[in-house]
Structures are given as C-alpha cells and as structure tokens.
Image (spheres, rainbow, N blue to C red):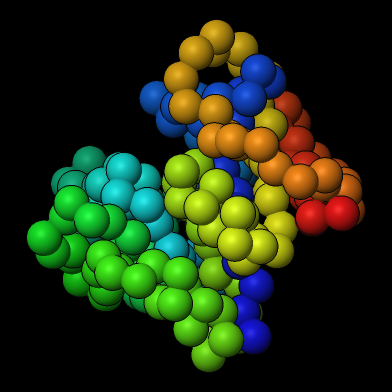
Amino acid sequence: MARFVFELNVSLDGYIEHQHFGPPDPALFRHFTERVRDLAGMVYGRHMYEVMRYWDQDHPDWDAEERDYAATWRGKPKWVVSRTLASVGPNATLVADDVQASVRKLKAELTGEIEVAGADLARSLGDLDLIDEYRLYLHPIVVGRGKPFFAGPRPRLRLVSSDIIVEDVVRLTYVPA
C-alpha cells in the first residue's frame, strides 16, 4: 500500500506561494531532486500541475542539476486531479471523475511514497483520511498573504520529526494524531 505525503515549501506565516521563495539553495535543490527520485509518483491538483509543467520542456539555460531534476520528474508517473483540464502531458493521467475511488485505488495498488501537491487537493484527500504525512519545508520568510499550506481545518496532528535540510530550511513532518 502506498503512503500519501503532502509536502511543500511554506513561509513562516503558513503560505505556499512559490514565487516568494526565490531560487532554491543548490543543496536544497539537490534534496528535492533526490526526493522526487525516491517517489513512486505524484498526485497533483490542477494549479500545482500547471506550475510543475515547467519541467516538461528543456530550457537552454538549464545547468546539469536542472536537467537532472527535469529528467527525474518526467520519469515519474503523475495523476492530475482536475475537472477543468481537457488533457495532461507526458507520463500523466487525468483524474476527472470519481476522484475518491481513483485515489483510493492508487493507494491500494501502488507501493512507496506518492507526493500529494496542491493545498486544495490535500484538503480533499485529508478529509477522506488519505494523507499519511504532512511535510512542511519551513523557510525564514513572511509573505503576509497567498495560498495557505492548510486549505482548511485538519484533525489534530502529531510531530514525528524535524530536520534541518539546509542552513535556513527546516522540514517538519506530521502525521494524523
């Protein structure tokens, strides 16, 4: 059975708007490449999938680490939950109907970790008790507005680990209590 993990970068005040974080520290970027390498796949909400589609096309100014990340990301299966998209890119499957049954089937049939990306999607899956872990990559910035990491109330969570990933980014890992 797969484990569903909702993990994203988050500001000190709880927002996930990626444009505020700037380019990642090279060591943090390598960490995320290794995280993707270890995943069984990803389940995306529409918005987060559209952000990540950046990695579908090569860019001439990429360095070796960016090319490595792109190749790693492209190689992973992706399931995109959306009622508005008509199609998705390579190595991706559109999940438009009966999301609950589709996601439960993924969880039951696959092994390893599957990343859940998108706050609204994570809220929906959390409401169905399908999120096994929440990982917050806490950055030392305050943005004051944007999309919150938690799109709605969650049941009580229990901290299971905290790790310094790079000098100023801490990963907090929680499970439902």
The relative height of residue 3 versus residue 169 in the rendered view (above or below) is: below
Which of 119/52 is in front? 119
Which of 174/103 is in front? 103
Q: Position of residue 90 (x, y in %)?
A: 20, 71
| Residue at 60% in and 54% down | 127
Residue 49 is at least partly visible in this image: yes
How many numbered badges does the structure rendering display?
A: 0
Q: Quadrant of the image for the N terminus?
A: bottom right
Horizontal side of 162 relative to 146 (left or right) equals right
Q: Quadrant of the image for the C terminus?
A: bottom right
Q: Position of residue 160 (x, y in %)?
A: 88, 53
Horizontal side of 70 relative to 168 (left or right) equals left
The relative height of residue 59 versus residue 82 in the rendered view (above or below) is: above
| Residue at 32% in and 62% down | 80
Q: Position of residue 15 (x, y in %)?
A: 55, 25
The relative height of residue 107 versus residue 43 in the rendered view (above or below) is: below
Horizontal side of 163 relative to 41 (left or right) equals right
Which of 100/116 is in front? 100
| Residue at 55% in and 47% down | 123
Q: Position of residue 121 (x, y in %)?
A: 46, 51
The relative height of residue 142 versus residue 129 in the rendered view (above or below) is: above
Toward the top, the furthest residue is 144
Toward the left, the furthest residue is 86
Horizontal side of 80 relative to 24 (left or right) equals left
Residue 9 is at least partly visible in this image: no
| Residue at 69% in and 48% down | 135
Which of 80/36 is in front? 80
**Which quadrant would residue 51 be assigned to in this image?**
top left
